Image (cartoon, grey):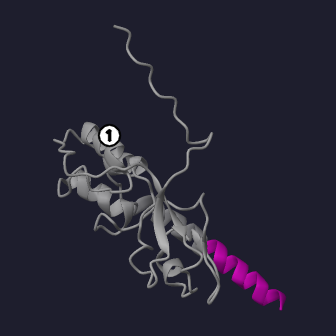
């Protein structure tokens, strides 16, 4: 018994050292600009941009194969920040930015089919089968991926309520 434990311990230590050395010598350096753009993205990995997550969209932005308006949840603010960062031309005329929204469940329409919870990338929708579902406000990113899969149209996107955490003081009018 002691020999088996000792041999597995030694084997684990040797393999750990081999993996550490391989990591140091075989490490692939990434593009630091992609990492900076990825930090600017919302990180919800909702797929509305058509890329596999925010990292795919960031890589496409840096490569030049995507426009600065690639991220719908980011809105106009993210698009202008990305355009400034990457030196891209920006046309915001076709981009709809109605502000941040959150999903809400109409309880009288919800049948508890769980389709919305299966497609939510952030697990913001909670509920059991044949029970009324609810949306966790802190986890919802407003990606709208849950709305088209609801068979009873019980999910609606509502504007984010103004609270102390989200309120921004308006700029004062310029004195003429």
Q: Reply yes or no: does residue 5 show up in magenta.
A: yes
Q: Nearer the viewer, residue 157 or 28?
A: 157
Closest to the observer, 121 or 152? 152
User: Relative to 165, is 8 above or below?
Assistant: below
In this view, which residue lies farthest toward the top?
176
Tell me residue 3's x, y (percent): 79, 88
Q: Which stretch did the figure color magenta?
A: 1-14
Assess whether residue 57 is covered by the magenta stretch.
Answer: no
The quadrant of the image that shows the N terminus is bottom right
Q: Main secondary structure of the magenta part?
A: helix
Looking at this view, name the residue that lies furthest to the bottom.
1
Pointer 1: what residue? Answer: 81
Helix, strand or loop status at disc 1: helix
| Image quarter of residue 47 | bottom left
The C terminus lies in which quarter of the figure?
Answer: top left
**For this view, does 38 lie left or right of residue 4?**
left
Residue drawn 59% across and 75% down?
Answer: 107
Q: Position of residue 74 (x, y in %)?
A: 37, 51
Few, some or many C-alpha atoms within 10 Å of disc 1 (few <14, some 14-19, many ≥20)? some
Query: Residue extending furthest front?
Result: 108
Of residue 127 and residue 120, the one placed in the foreground of this image is: 127
Quarter residue 113 falls in: bottom right
Q: Is residue 135 above or below residue 150?
A: above
Q: Position of residue 106 (x, y in %)?
A: 55, 72
């Amino acid at each position: 018994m002691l020999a088996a434990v000792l041999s597995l311990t030694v084997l684990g230590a040797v393999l750990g050292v081999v993996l550490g050395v391989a990591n140091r010598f075989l490490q692939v350096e990434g593009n630091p600009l992609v990492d900076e753009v990825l930090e600017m993205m919302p990180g919800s990995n909702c797929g509305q941009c058509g890329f596999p997550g925010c990292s795919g969209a960031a890589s496409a932005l840096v490569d030049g194969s995507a426009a600065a308006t690639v991220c719908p949840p980011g809105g106009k603010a993210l698009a202008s920040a990305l355009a400034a960062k990457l030196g891209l031309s920006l046309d915001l005329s076709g981009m709809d930015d109605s502000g941040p929204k959150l999903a809400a469940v109409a309880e009288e329409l919800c049948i508890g089919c769980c389709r919305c919870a299966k497609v939510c990338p952030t697990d913001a929708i909670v509920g059991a089968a044949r029970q009324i579902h609810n949306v966790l406000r802190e986890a919802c990113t407003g990606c709208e991926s849950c709305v088209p899969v609801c068979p009873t149209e019980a999910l609606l996107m509502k504007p984010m309520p103004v609270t102390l955490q989200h309120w921004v003081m308006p700029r004062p009018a310029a004195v003429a």
